Amino acid sequence: MTKPVHISKKYKRELPPRESGGDFFWQMNLSKTTVVIGSQWGDEGKGKIVDFLSAKSDFIVRFHGGNNAGHTVVNSLGTFKMHLIPCGVFYPGTKLVITHGVVIDPLTLIKEIKTLEKSGVSLENRLFISPRAHIIMPYHRLLDSLYEKNKGKNKTGTTGRGIGPVYADKVSYMGIRLEDLVSPAVFKEKIALYLPIKNKIIKALGGKPLSFSKILKEYTLYARALKKYVTEPYFVLAEAAGKGKRILYEGAHGILLDNDWGTYPFVTASSVLPDISGKSSVIGIVKAYSTRVGEGPLPTEQANGIGEKLRKIGDEYGSTTGRPRRCGWFDAALVRFAARVGGFTGIALTKLDVLSDFKTIKVSVGYRGNGKNQGISGLDLKKAKPVYRTFKGWGKSLDNITSYKNLPTEAKKYIEFIESFVQVPVKYISTGPSRSALINR
């Protein structure tokens, strides 16, 4: 049962009750099944929220994407940029699952495992990887870069990790799965079949053909390192759900990068939206301003001093590629669209502290000629002219604020407008990069 809602007189809508004080890690009312998903173009701060929610979860599940997305977690052990292993790894009681929807770069995964083990984090009997997960091969990465090069000025702006080509092979019956990798005879047979085909394409695009023996030797070593983690997770999760265990699904990208619902073709290769029957809570991760890596429309982009200031204060550089992120004001119209498509039941607002040094802050509420646009369908975002609403900044640090009532009045107005416009309550507010810099409403 939820608590009675607080009615905001200003916005005439239901808002969540305001709580303060206490140990926020243990005040959570986490549903049995929760999905954490980005609402913009990625980089919203999902890692911190997943890490926070993991404190009261039994299973953490990565269900799509690959190492083209990085989740950063800051804790007492250091700063970790996770690309494949679920962020909940830092809680010893959690089980970690990588499902069939994820594509795996074996070397990246092995490096993550070794980094965690060196920091004292054990994965023994905790990590379960689906044998159905597809493997990124060297020719996937090479083809990714060759495709981009040959597109010229019309390039998509991929991370170059081979994500698109491996998903393409998955649906064109040329994929290699983890179960193939750990079966030496099967793996050798598939490489012998597929590599000559790929080398013909590589050569035609101006690349250098790859060596069969080198790939076989390299990936045989990967197979030995990963074999002990290969377990069909369907039965693990089904049993956990039957026992009432708390399961947290960790999304890797934002909805506006979804292959169907995003700004195609400037999107990711996988479907960002989870198809999880019986999910009871969907937390949309929303950055307090907008960022995007690579090509594609970003209507509120500030290619000026404002954008540079956001990038500098927010340290907006890709955790996977290191590329500078394009920065701009918050786009409430697109976030509302993402919230409806994703079925958000709550929002985690991240990086609010980055806006503390701005005297005025703008929010896009739609586009010229489209009013308060309900979505992105039929709208050419490249030519979209945002309609802004301006807010007064709060001009003070948010350090050490872990209670909503202690936020500056202007910050509260900003938050309440966002949840009013998006029509989803803001349940969590990040006020800094550390694990404890979080308000739980």
Image (cartoon, rainbow, N blue to C red):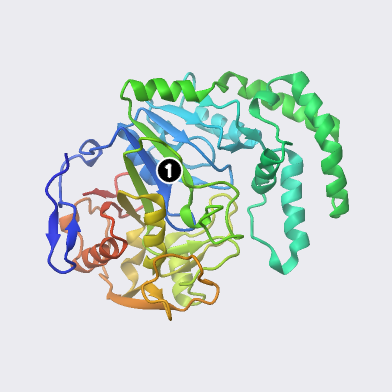
> Which residue does the numbered mark 1 point to in the structure image?
73
Residue at image coords 75%, 66%: 152
Residue 208: tell me if it is visible: no
Instruction: State the residue lying farthest toward the front.
Output: 378
Where residue 407 sits, quadrant-wise, is bottom left
Left or right: 326, with 2 as reference point: right
Instruction: Please name the residue shown 64% across and 60% down the image.
Output: 157
Residue type at the position of mark 1: Val
Question: Which of 314 and 201 lies nearest the eye of the viewer?
Answer: 201
**Is residue 269 in view from this perspective?**
yes
Which part of the image, by quadrant, shows the N terminus? top left
Vertical position of residue 351 compared to residue 279: above or below = below
Q: How far across and how far down the image is residue 97, in percent?
A: 48, 29
Task: Describe the element under mark 1 as helix, strand or loop.
Answer: strand
In the rendered structure, the answer to whether residue 220 lies left or right of residue 391 reads: right
Residue 289, by quadrant, is bottom left
Q: Residue 387 occupies which quadrant of the picture?
A: bottom left
Total tally of numbered discs in the picture: 1
The percent coordinates of residue 82 (x first, y second) are: 51, 41
Q: Position of residue 385 (x, y in %)?
A: 46, 79
